[in-house]
Amino acid sequence: MIWHVARKELTEITRDGRFLWSAFIIIVLLLTSLGVAASRYGEDRALREAATREVRSQWLNQGVKGPHSAAHYGVYAFKPSTPLALFDPGLNDYTGTVTMLEAHKENQASYKPAQDATSLQRFGDLSGAMILQLLIPLLIILLCFGMISGEREEGTLRQLLSVGAKRSDLVWGKAVGVAVTLGLVLVPSVLVGAVLSGLIVGESDPHDMIDFPAKVAVLAGGYLAYLAIFVVVSLTVSIMAKSSRTALTILLGFWILNGLLLPRAAADVSRQLYPTPSALELSQAIRVGRDRGPHPHEPNHPNHIAFREKLLATYKVERIEDLPYGFFGLALEADETHGFKVFDRHVGELNRRYAMQNRFQQAIGVLSPFIAVRSLSSALAGTDVDFANQFAAAGEAYRRNLVKVTNDDLKRNTVGWTTFDAEWRYKAGDDVWKRVPAFDFDAPPLGDILARNWLPIAVLAAWLFGGVVALLSVSRRMKIDV
Amino acid sequence: MLKAEALRKDYNGHMALKGLDLEIKPGEIYCLLGANGSGKSTTINLFLDFIKPTSGRALVGGLDAKQHPIETKRLLAYIPEIVMLYRNLTAVENLRYFSGLAGHSEYSDADLLAFLERAGLPGHAPHKRVGGYSKGMRQKVGIAIAVAKQVKALLLDEPTSGLDPKASNEFSELLVQLSRDGVAILMATHDLFRAKECGTRVGIMKHGVLVGDLATQDIGHADLEALYLKHMHD
Amino acid sequence: MITQIMKHEWRLLLRDRLLFIAIPVYALLLAYGVYNGDAWRQFLTTNVAAATATADDNIGKLAEKAERIERGEPYGAYEDPRIPGRFARTMAFEMAVKPPGPTSAIAIGQSDVHPSYLLVQWRAMFNQSNTDEVENPVNLAVGRFDLSFVLIYLYPLLIIALSFNMLSSEREGGTQVLMLSQPVSVGQFVVGKVTVRGLVIIGMAVTLSLLGVMASGAELADGGLWRLGAWGLAIIAYGGFWFGLSVLVNAFAGKSSTNAMVLMGTWLVLVLLAPAVLNLVAKSTYPLPSRIELVQAARRGYDAAKREAPPSAQAGGAAAELASRGGEDVMLAELNTAFKDVIPLEMRGEAAAAPMFKRFDEQRDRQHGLIDRLKYVSPAILAADVMGELADTSTASYRAFSHQVGAYHARWRDHFFDRIMAGPVLGAADIRATPRFNFVPEEDGVVAARVVPGLAALLGFVLAVFAAGFGKLRQYPAAAR
């Protein structure tokens, strides 16, 4: 019975020229966006890999120089991306791409691609994710809004039920019909798009491919649930609404709230609930905090003197030349250790606020499954805040190791040297540079992503479950006449 | 007042009206009879300039409806089979709006109520929203709109179909009153009895041609039915 | 006659529940948009003032430090602000600020991804530390809930909701035949219907947002007045376009549901899809060289310059000799000499990397030029563009600022270069005389030149849809067949 109804719906939908045209346009947009993104992804990756190799060789071949000067020379880290980013670019245009890792400074990643774009950028990107998150739901609404209310207005519903069709069979038949239709449109084009972009992108760095098939599977499941929500909600509204016109109005209103109004409103409210400091305030706070450190380069600074006195007292010696470690190395180390604390306090607080903002927005997903699927999708694609934060954290950890290696070398090899000599006359070589490993960054594994995104997953599941229950209950009480 | 001169209407090869000649003088009630699709509504729509004639002219007060759509509409009123009104407005508000559009914004509320009363609307109704009106009540508001417009010609398209006999009778009496005031009335109808009762002349249409045209006083009721059926069988 | 129709339409609208829900919500959204724009403007104003104060404070402190050193207090060479190279390169800095424009509450535009101040010192601007505003990237990607969002996305939707069935509902409700049997043309009805709805929706948008922006402290004297005027015109034109489109769609005498779908589809294409597709076209036609390449080019240039002339070759000998004796005065001499080496070296490195940067800028200009030509495709893009320009929050406005900063950076270098190379230390007075950045807002004519074509095109769109709509109405089929 269900299949019988589904087949009739399928025939009807596929005979509708408007549907065929919209499906065609959506397929073209999907394939174009994937193709363009894939070729750009390939180019970016090639560039990033070459640059990473170059940076590494620059570091290793910087020749004989002071270790601290080498730490100032530093290393650049480039934010990688997983191949799923070409489907969902997420926040990639709004997070920095390059971080300079150097002595004394916890640089934030800079060069957001959005800065180089025009205002057009702010209308959003055309991507596979955008098509699945916004356009396909609209198509579902247009397919479903009149499915029951229309039959009621035409009088065919009365006829159908007089033949003895069960109401729930009728409704589920229609749902299956829509699902099969969409499947016929989407599955082949997504497969073609995936194969196409796979061919363009080619072999990827294994660091970016961690849990890749599992991530793709979860992603597919998430979108399936999201689109299914739209099918059941649209059918429920079509049964409940007085007329097709009312059903369409309600569903379009839902679509606008879901994808347009609530995401912005939620972002805005979250910003007001959990305000973040301005960049100036943050950098001032860090500067003020760092200023309390031992000022290793300024021997007459009161902090420097205090640090020196304390050190001399601890080791019970008179002169810094008598310390068991190079003083300059010790001072730099103490300065960095102090800097880490300051940085961790302020940036840690900032990241906590971001996390609270994001959590709040995810909670608003209870009203807008768009927010939920967006969070989940960008997390799986490695284009969310967590990925950017993890990259920043990995960079900072790498930087801390880099300064530790250079400072340790100073500590060990400048025992008995004056500060001036240690800074200007002591030279280290390749063996020290080699002690700093190459920077690499692993995409987070699936388990971490799921643990961080249980809320959007729960929201999607709740919407789907609630939608199915609502559809079941209204289909039992379906009105037959206008 | 209303005059059709060799009026033809061709819908993509289908001849709906094949050269109609007809004249209705002030005070006349002309009833057009005929099967569905015989060209009755087409004739009325041509006088209203809702559709354009393929050839020939539909004259209202000597003016060609096609050339002077606005001027001719000042002279005539139209009552469709089902008078649909703004359901969120009351009868008085509907009447005021349509009178205003017709150029009579001078009417006071008392005037408007008088028109509605004359059209036979029950006393409690005028200040209620028309959403809850029966067909007969809406039809009466339609008459009131026509009366208030003070027109020279009235076009009616099956105005009594679906009305109960009493309402239908009241409606006919209103038409007779209007014709006494010198209004030319063209009414398309299926109701032979009504046509004989209130019409002054009767025309029978078939496939876009006026096949019969006679004064009602010259013919008995049974003869009219016989004549009608005879034309339909040919 | 038209006033009669308008009165009638107004009464009908009043009796419709939709209006009672929609209008307060709409007013609320407009007010919230203004509030947000205003809050952002206030943030920028305080932020910019705080940034300037930081630079003032720093230079003041350095001058005081120099005075104390001149008075003979002990100091470390690294603390000495009198060394010109050290002062110009790391110790002193200017915060080049871009204060919000007179009407910036209109649209936050690109001003949330661009910094509102740039730190300027000797270092090349590209290598300068990042002064991007702190903002959750999620919020950046979603965009702000400002007035321009309400006007560009939601305002057309409300217009569509109130006008998609202005003729079709009369046709479907059966009132059309009575209406058209009156001595009034369809065109007059439509004018009446559109005027009432336009007065309500466009009128509210214009008055509420103009009042809001004026209340938020728009400086009318500083070019705020013509901006507000042009902005009002843009709102009217953009709203007019959607009304005109509704007239055109209604003129085809389709069903209400068809009208709704056609209008929503057009909204989707013009507001969501066209900008996204154009963005893709521009990005793939003129792809920007990656910032990664720029970073590497800058570094390669520096390394190459260093290989040609290693700094220690000159600085090493005499200075190291002196340095072995130790002491602050020697370190001072050492540092001062070092900068004479390092600074020209850096400059050679920058010169080597310059072509790459030039290519980046040119490519970006080409990309932006292409978008500038393509924006005429959609009134939504035009409206967003015009609003951004009028609010001084566009990319073009930021680029103008960044050119000024570039010029100022060159001035900074010119000012200090001779002193670094000649070697005499700076006095407290010299430090206080450090050249400062002074933001010059773009001339009204320049901004107007960017606004006028977009505004004109928007008005062209309005004329075109209304002309097409009323043209089509002439053949409006009155009889229901």
Image (cartoon, coloured by chain):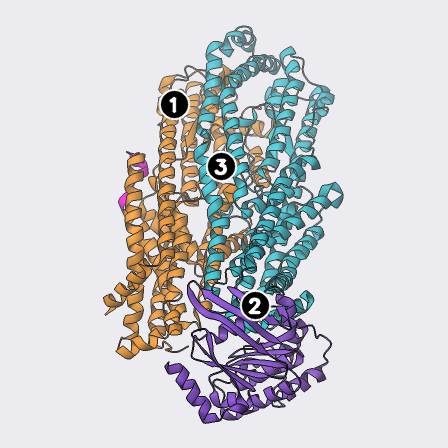
Chain colours: A orange, B purple, C cyan
Q: In the image, is C441 to the left or to the right of C304? A: right
Relative height, residue A374 to residue B133 (above, below)? above
**Chain under callout 1:** A
Amino acid type, label 3? Lys
| Element marked by disc 1 | helix
Which residue occupies the foreground of this view, A290 or A235?
Answer: A235
Q: Is residue B54 magenta?
A: no
Which numbered dot is residue B57? 2
Q: Quadrant of the N terminus of chain A?
A: bottom left
Mark 1 or mark 3: which comes first in sequence? Answer: 1
The residue labelled by disc 3 is A112
Which residue occupies the foreground of this view, C58 or A333?
Answer: C58
Relative height, residue C272 to residue A300 (above, below)? below
| Residue at the right extreme, as displayed | C221
Relative height, residue B234 to residue C325 (above, below)? below
**Chain under callout 2:** B
The stretch in magenta equals A201-213
Where is residue B177, by image quadrant?
bottom right
The residue labelled by disc 1 is A54
Mark 3 to mark 2: distance in Å? 73 Å
